[in-house]
Amino acid sequence: MFTIVRRILYFFVPFTAVFWLVHEQFETIISRSTLNGLSGFYSADGLIFGLIAAFVIQREWEMWVNLSESVRAEIDAVREMWKWSMYAEGALCEKAHHHLENYLTLIVAEWDAGHVNQRSHAVDAELDGLRDILANMSLAAGNLGFPLQGAFTNLVQARDLRLNYSNEHMPSILKRIVIFADILLIILSLFLAVNNIYIDYIFTAAISVLAFALILVVDDLDSPFRPGAWHLTTDGYETLLKELTRSTQS
């Protein structure tokens, strides 16, 4: 939230300077625009922009929710595999926990390196190792194999969903349209005025800041791994990794 507020403040200062410059240099144009009823056309532009922004934000929010749910599902699947593998024979349990630790460590490292949306051969290798361990566990204790295989399937599916949702972004042409509409809305607001200059400034600034904030929200939702008002972190993976490490050391 602080990031968005700071970015709005960075926008607010130059906007104030432009507002007073426009009113000093183009006062006659502003008055004539108001008298000619252009405010009605501006309202139509604002309505169109609002509809586009609402559609985009709704779509981006759905993608963000799906991505965050896939992350939680991946963490839950790893925890289930860890819990169920504890009932296996000692050596197999130790190997399974080793692969799970490596899996979490790799996810955190690749996330921090900015490769969270790329399929990793190292992570695939750990999954292959887990698959082999699960096969041995199923042979050693048949009943144990069913919950472990179910948890492993959930893990693979959650990882695939995370990678898929990580690589889905707003089409560039749509993003340009939204940004252009936002800029147009802000610029046109400078040429529609009320009689009191201070009230005019308050209303114009409110419209412009709101339009700018909508763009910031869309941009943040479209970049879920970049630090911002809404972004995903490795906290869940790191917490589970610490729990697993303490369990193996005790």
Image: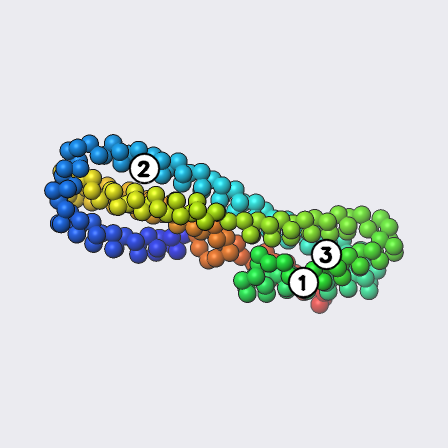
Residue 206 left/right relative to 110: left
Q: At x 27% / y 52%, what residue is drawn?
A: 12
Q: Residues within 10 Å of mark 3 (few under 14, many from 20)?
A: many
Does residue 246 appear in this view? no
Mark 3 vs mark 1: which is more N-terminal? 3
The one of 83 and 176 positioned closer to us in this rendering = 176
Which residue corresponds to mark 1?
Answer: 121
- In the rendered image, residue 156, in percent from the top left (x then y), is placed at 69, 52
Does residue 225 appear in this view? yes
Q: At x 26% / y 46%, what residue is drawn?
A: 187
Q: At x 81% / y 62%, what residue is drawn?
A: 92
The secondary structure type at the circle numbered 3 is: helix
Task: Give the colour scheme shown.
Answer: rainbow
Amino acid on which disc 1 is placed: His
Which residue corresponds to mark 3?
Answer: 82
Amino acid on which disc 2 is placed: Gly
Tell which tag, 3 or 1, sits nearer the viewer.
1
Which residue corresponds to mark 2?
Answer: 46
**Position above or below: 76 against 124:** above
Q: Which corner quadrant holds the C terminus?
A: bottom right
The picture quadrant where one finds residue 2 is: bottom left
